[in-house]
Image (cartoon, rainbow, N blue to C red):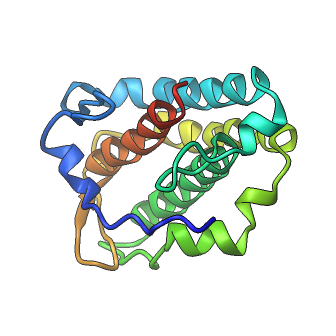
Amino acid sequence: MAIVPDTKDWTRALQRRCPECGYDSARTTRAAVPRLVRGNAAAWEAALSSRDAVHLRTRPRGDRWSAAEYACHVRDVFRVFDQRLVLMLDADDPTFPNWDQDATAVAERYQEQDPSAVAGEPAEAAERLAGRFAGLTPAQWERTGTRSDGARFTVDSSAGYLLHDPVHHLHDIGG
């Protein structure tokens, strides 16, 4: 079953609390980012370890991925945001390569991946990203980058935008 591509502008989560999952980027401090990234990844590992494989691979509705697919996506979100963070630290106002999450889900065959194999992968990717956030200086939090659609971010706003995604998807799976 194909998922309808998501066309929402999720940057709105930087301006106000998400009405669906409750995430509020304004309440996220820079110091908390590494802990929140690691904690979210641990929650994904727990979610994938606490359910049977059939349940983890079952899409609850036509507009929702399965828990295993969302875990693959979150793993890749952590990886992509780590790459973007490196770009912002190494180059002046880089433009990020486009990342089509729906095309990635198909190309990487999210629906076919083994939930038990995927369970620890978000934590691996999150640890690398969290470590990088933990080592930032105040000036580095202000560095900028631009998404391929023109949306501009600082490292700080990118962290808030990043955190909303895996928090929201835990909400999607009831985790």
From the viewer's perspective, is residue 55 above or below residue 72?
Answer: above
- Count of residue discs: 0
From the viewer's perspective, is residue 54 above or below residue 35?
Answer: below
Give the residue drawn at x 20%, y 45%: 14
Q: Is residue 135 visible?
A: no
Compared across the picture, whether 174 is left or right of 110 comes to: left
Looking at the picture, tell me which residue is in the foreground, 29 or 164: 164
Compared across the picture, whether 168 is left or right of 9 comes to: right
Looking at the picture, tell me which residue is in the foreground, 143 or 122: 122
Looking at the picture, tell me which residue is in the foreground, 127 or 150: 150
Looking at the picture, tell me which residue is in the foreground, 123 or 107: 107
Give the residue drawn at x 52%, y 48%: 61
From the viewer's perspective, is residue 146 above or below residue 22?
Answer: below
Q: Is residue 122 visible?
A: yes
* Image quarter (top left, top right, bottom left or bottom right) of the N terminus: bottom right
**Which x, y percent locates residue 136?**
42, 41
**Which x, y percent locates residue 38?**
58, 28
Give the residue drawn at x 73%, y 68%: 108
Give the residue drawn at x 14%, y 38%: 16
**Which x, y percent locates residue 107?**
70, 75
**Which x, y percent locates residue 2?**
58, 68
From the viewer's perspective, is residue 28 above or below residue 53?
Answer: above
Compared across the picture, whether 164 is left or right of 104 comes to: left
Compared across the picture, whether 65 is left or right of 163 comes to: right
